[in-house]
Image (tube, rainbow, N blue to C red):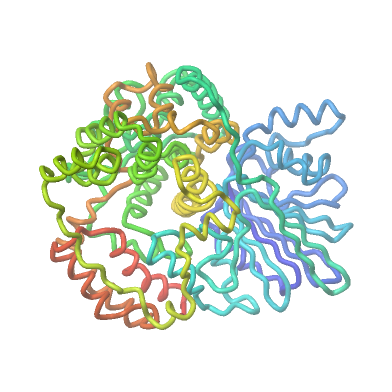
């Protein structure tokens, strides 16, 4: 895991790579080449994970000096690729996966991308042909941003590397800010919240050619955002899932430095820790890091302890404090580059901070499972709508009862929406008469309606836009929902937050659920392998029989890196929340209806409606604007 920079045409400025020293404290490199389009700069900051000798330093040239590589990520199948190329007569001078990547490009060109298993963002400069090739992994695990100005084009691992470059405006992209504030979604298109900055999306590559003094860029998708279709039974699906998952974890353990895992106590991270312990021959050398709270409604420590007992791992527990949320917010926002969605990102920050104290340099984490397997409770309406469409009344009744038992979901609204329309009119009327009355929802507030939003916002909505931009099918059922969550919306946002939080502490975060053979299998599975009744992630639960502690495998609640946000914001942080909201209203009056925004905030803080993530998003806008000097 590292940081990179590359530019053509801009005046070379080494601060563009030094600004991200946190991504690579183990080495730095900078080189400038000549071209008709202007100077070509390549920069690198190294976090040494595989072959920690100086042989892995970058920019990495081939023997002739024609090709130069800067690379961020890991190629997990580098050993297999190296042997394949050695059989063709290729000679290697290091044990690094970076050299394997460079040589793979020299042998197969851009077709090498389909052979790679891993997470990557890289640039390769061809000094003879004067071309630059850039690529990003299938799911966007590693970042790669693009900035084009009057002087040329630049690529970087973090947006802050572009600050002050010729053509930088310091203005926000109002449409993407609208999506973030209103829907809580970011990284769902190629655009960012900075005007003029885009990203290569997961599965995209770019070729930059110099023709005379002109610079021409062609971006294409090398990995399609699609899924196959499998019709197999439950036992076969669980067995195949287990095989693919075991193989992925085994590959993700390749490292020349100490390795550990985030452990939330949920299904995903617990499965990773249990398989890691087995692959390592026991948990004695396996460090886990977890965030805990005295608030029982969000504390998962009993589940974490069950996993630790079962594996023998060495646990590390951190207890994020309310007092630190605002104290750390400026630093976290700087590292995130863009506003972030909730104080749960602060909890994740604390986990990586503790991992660094423990001397762990690589951490495996569970990102990606919920998106592929419909693990979020927001997936249930799509599942139940499918049952209603197929008139499966028995399954609807089962789901309603199990959602009540597992999740405490009120029964009456589900009966009204999903069951009554399928019953004879007289029977439906008798049942409806016996249901308790509905509790009116708090009145909607038109708080996000300032002049900038009216003029430049996104009228389509964030989720439909995300689906449309990748030409995915409309979200109508679990299959289409999982496709959009994985390729187009939620997952990319979570990967962004994880990358920045881990790299802020010079830690490589790895995500075994995103090994592409596993993802392709999981997305191809039918809906019945994902939700059954009140059960989410059905195939994962069945695959982990005999692996996970029973208490963890059978849990049905869903928390993740949750924080006691409602208790904090209505309690010790209430004054700071008010101040943060007012700061955002002052800095960005073009975004908000001030009175409606204050009304919304008051409703949440005074208990008239639940606290949700909207509150933190509003507050974080002013922190972002101040830290990066953003104008609307």
At horizontal 80% and vertical 31% (from top left) the residue drawn is 85
Name above or below for residue 319 compared with residue 128. Answer: above
Q: Quadrant of residue 114?
A: top right
Position of 350 compared to 204: left or right?
left
At horizontal 27% and vertical 74% (from top left) the residue drawn is 597
What is the x, y in percent for residue 395? 31, 30
Tell which of 292 and 469 is nearer to you.
469
Tell which of 252 and 241 is nearer to you.
241
Q: Quadrant of residue 49?
A: top right
At horizontal 55% and vertical 58% (from top left) the residue drawn is 21
Image label count? 0
Tell which of 519 and 298 is nearer to you.
519
What is the x, y in percent for residue 261? 42, 35
Position of 61 compared to 383: left or right?
right
Position of 169 compared to 213: left or right?
left
What is the x, y in percent for residue 559? 30, 43
Name above or below for residue 278 compared with residue 164. Answer: above
Tell which of 415 and 107 is nearer to you.
415
What is the x, y in percent for residue 504? 46, 54
Position of 356 compared to 223: left or right?
left
């Amino acid at each position: 895991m590292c940081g990179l920079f590359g530019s053509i045409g801009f005046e070379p400025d080494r601060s563009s790579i030094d600004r991200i020293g946190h991504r690579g404290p183990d080495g730095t490199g900078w080189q400038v080449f000549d071209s008709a389009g202007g100077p070509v700069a390549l920069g690198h900051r190294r976090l040494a994970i595989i072959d920690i000798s100086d042989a892995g330093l970058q920019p990495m040239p081939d023997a002739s000096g024609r090709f130069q590589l800067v690379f961020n990520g890991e190629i997990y199948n580098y050993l297999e690729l190296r042997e394949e190329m050695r059989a063709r007569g290729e000679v290697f001078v290091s044990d690094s996966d970076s050299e394997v990547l460079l040589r793979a490009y020299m042998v197969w060109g851009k077709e090498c991308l389909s052979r790679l298993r891993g997470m990557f963002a890289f640039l390769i400069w061809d000094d003879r042909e004067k071309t630059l090739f850039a690529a990003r992994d299938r799911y966007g695990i590693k970042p790669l941003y693009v900035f084009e100005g009057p002087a040329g084009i630049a690529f970087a691992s973090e947006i802050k590397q572009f600050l002050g470059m010729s053509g930088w405006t310091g203005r926000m992209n109002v449409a993407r800010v609208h999506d973030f504030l209103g829907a809580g979604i970011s990284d769902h298109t190629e655009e960012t919240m900075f005007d003029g900055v885009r990203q290569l999306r997961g599965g995209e590559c770019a070729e930059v050619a110099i023709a005379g003094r002109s610079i021409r860029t062609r971006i294409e998708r090398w990995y399609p955002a699609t899924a196959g279709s499998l019709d197999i039974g439950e036992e076969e699906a669980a067995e195949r899932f287990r095989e693919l998952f075991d193989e992925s974890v085994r590959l993700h353990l390749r490292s020349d430095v100490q390795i550990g895992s985030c452990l939330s106590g949920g299904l995903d991270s617990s499965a990773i820790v249990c398989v890691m312990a087995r692959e390592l021959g026991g948990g004695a050398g396996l460090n886990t890091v977890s965030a805990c709270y005295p608030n029982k409604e969000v504390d998962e420590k009993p589940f974490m302890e069950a996993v630790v007992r079962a594996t023998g791992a060495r646990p590390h527990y951190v207890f994020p404090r309310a007092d630190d949320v605002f104290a750390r917010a400026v630093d976290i926002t700087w590292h995130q580059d863009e506003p972030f969605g909730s104080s749960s990102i602060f909890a994740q920050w604390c986990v990586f901070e503790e991992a660094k104290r423990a001397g762990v340099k690589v951490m495996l984490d569970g990102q990606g499972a919920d998106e592929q397997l419909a693990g979020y409770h927001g997936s249930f309406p799509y599942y139940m709508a499918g049952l209603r469409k197929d008139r499966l009344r028995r399954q609807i009744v089962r789901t309603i009862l199990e959602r009540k038992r597992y999740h405490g979901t009120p029964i009456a609204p589900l009966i009204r929406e999903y069951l009554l329309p399928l019953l004879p009119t007289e029977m439906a009327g008798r049942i409806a008469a016996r249901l308790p009355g509905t509790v009116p929802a708090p009145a909607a507030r038109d708080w996000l309606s300032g002049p900038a939003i009216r003029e430049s916002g996104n009228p389509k909505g964030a989720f439909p836009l995300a689906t449309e931009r990748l030409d995915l099918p409309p979200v109508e059922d679990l299959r289409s929902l999982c496709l959009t969550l994985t390729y187009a919306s939620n997952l990319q946002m979570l990967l962004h937050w994880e990358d920045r939080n881990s790299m802020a502490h010079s830690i490589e975060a790895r995500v075994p659920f995103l090994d592409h053979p596993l993802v392709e299998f999981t997305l191809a599975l039918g809906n019945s392998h994902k939700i059954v009744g009140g059960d989410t992630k059905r195939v994962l639960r069945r695959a982990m029989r005999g692996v996970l502690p029973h208490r963890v495998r059978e849990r049905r609640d869903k928390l993740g890196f949750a924080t006691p946000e409602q208790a904090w914001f209505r309690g010790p942080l209430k004054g700071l929340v008010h101040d943060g909201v007012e700061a955002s209203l002052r800095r960005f009056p073009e975004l908000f209806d001030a009175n409606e925004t204050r009304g919304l905030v008051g409703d949440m803080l005074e208990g008239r409606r639940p606290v949700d993530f909207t509150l933190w998003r509003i507050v974080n806008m002013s922190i972002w604007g101040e830290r990066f000097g953003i104008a609307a």
